[in-house]
Image (tube, rainbow, N blue to C red):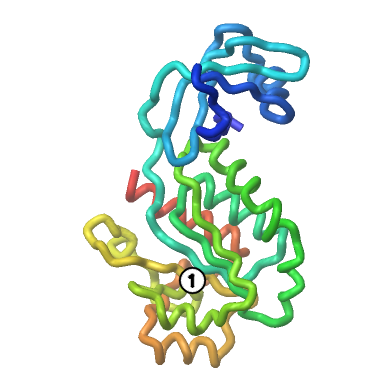
């Protein structure tokens, strides 16, 4: 991690925070920070900061908040829908979402065969930890909203979306840079990623009958996390 993630509630009234466990070990063994040296810190929903090593013991490192840094990136104020992926893929999607600072992520079980994935801690108690690793990597301070919709109807959700729904499928129209330039619009976009096996014919028909735009990232059948990474990178270049 390039940044140490600290929550505002962890700071005391003197702007000090005592870190133990993984963060303490990272500062001492990876960053190799000594007394009075500076550490880059990201505080979710607040920003980027420079902290100083205030004291060190065998089991903890205490940092002191010193100054505010310019935001290292502009978060991506867009929202994404995913057909529930395997937990290993889900980890990567969450890491990327935290790294780029997307607004919201929705997971839906569009395929009944994958319902057992909901039992994984990736979609439960461990979910925030994967967002945090992404934020620690890039310094993004916008904590994504993640919704694990275990029981809701995904078709009803898309139909009721207040904005523009864009379905990503390799058989769709080629995605253009003009379309990706969302700076001038106030419309709420939801980008929809399907299962790696692709959408079924009846699902494509549903999208067309619903008036959703179907766009392609290319004719190559990419793994979900690779397609998501490529798409986020294109959006990031435009917005930053």
Is 35 rendered above or below residue 87? above
Spot occupied by residue 179 in the image (x, y as percentages of width and height): 31, 65
How many labels were placed on the picture? Answer: 1
- Residue 34 sits in quarter: top right
- The residue sitting at 44% across, 68% down in the picture is 191
Which image quarter holds the N terminus? top right
- Residue 207 sits in quarter: bottom left
Spot occupied by residue 54 in the image (x, y as percentages of width and height): 58, 11
Residue 40 appears in the picture as rendered: yes
Q: Nearer the viewer, residue 3 or 201?
A: 3
Disc 1 secondary structure class: strand
Which image quarter holds the C terminus? top left
Give the farthest residue toward the left. 184
Residue 2 appears in the picture as rendered: no
Task: Report which residue position mark 1 lands on.
Answer: 192
- The residue sitting at 47% across, 72% down in the picture is 168
Spot occupied by residue 176 in the image (x, y as percentages of width and height): 34, 65
On screen, residue 184 versus residue 198, left or right, reads left
Mark 1 surroundings: few (<14), some (14-19) or many (≥20) residues within 10 A: some
């Amino acid at each position: 991690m390039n940044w140490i993630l600290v929550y505002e509630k962890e700071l005391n009234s003197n702007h000090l925070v005592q870190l133990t466990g993984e963060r303490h070990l990272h500062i001492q063994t990876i960053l190799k920070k000594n007394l009075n040296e500076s550490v880059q810190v990201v505080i979710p929903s607040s920003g980027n900061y420079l902290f100083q090593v205030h004291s060190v013991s065998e089991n903890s490192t205490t940092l002191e908040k010193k100054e505010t840094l310019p935001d290292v990136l502009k978060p991506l104020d867009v929202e994404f829908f995913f057909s529930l992926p395997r937990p290993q893929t889900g980890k990567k999607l969450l890491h990327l979402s935290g790294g780029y600072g997307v607004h919201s992520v929705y997971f839906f079980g569009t395929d009944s065969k994958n319902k057992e994935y909901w039992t994984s801690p990736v979609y439960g108690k461990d979910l925030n930890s994967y967002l945090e690793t992404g934020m620690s990597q890039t310094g993004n301070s916008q904590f994504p909203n993640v919704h694990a919709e275990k029981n809701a109807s995904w078709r009803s959700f898309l139909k009721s979306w207040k904005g523009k729904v864009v379905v990503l499928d390799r058989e769709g129209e080629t995605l253009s840079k003009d379309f990706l330039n969302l700076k001038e619009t106030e419309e709420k976009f939801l980008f929809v990623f399907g299962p790696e096996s692709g959408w079924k014919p009846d699902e494509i028909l549903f999208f067309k009958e619903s008036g959703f735009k179907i766009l392609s990232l290319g004719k190559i059948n990419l793994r979900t996390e690779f397609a998501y990474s490529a798409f986020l990178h294109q959006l990031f270049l435009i917005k930053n």
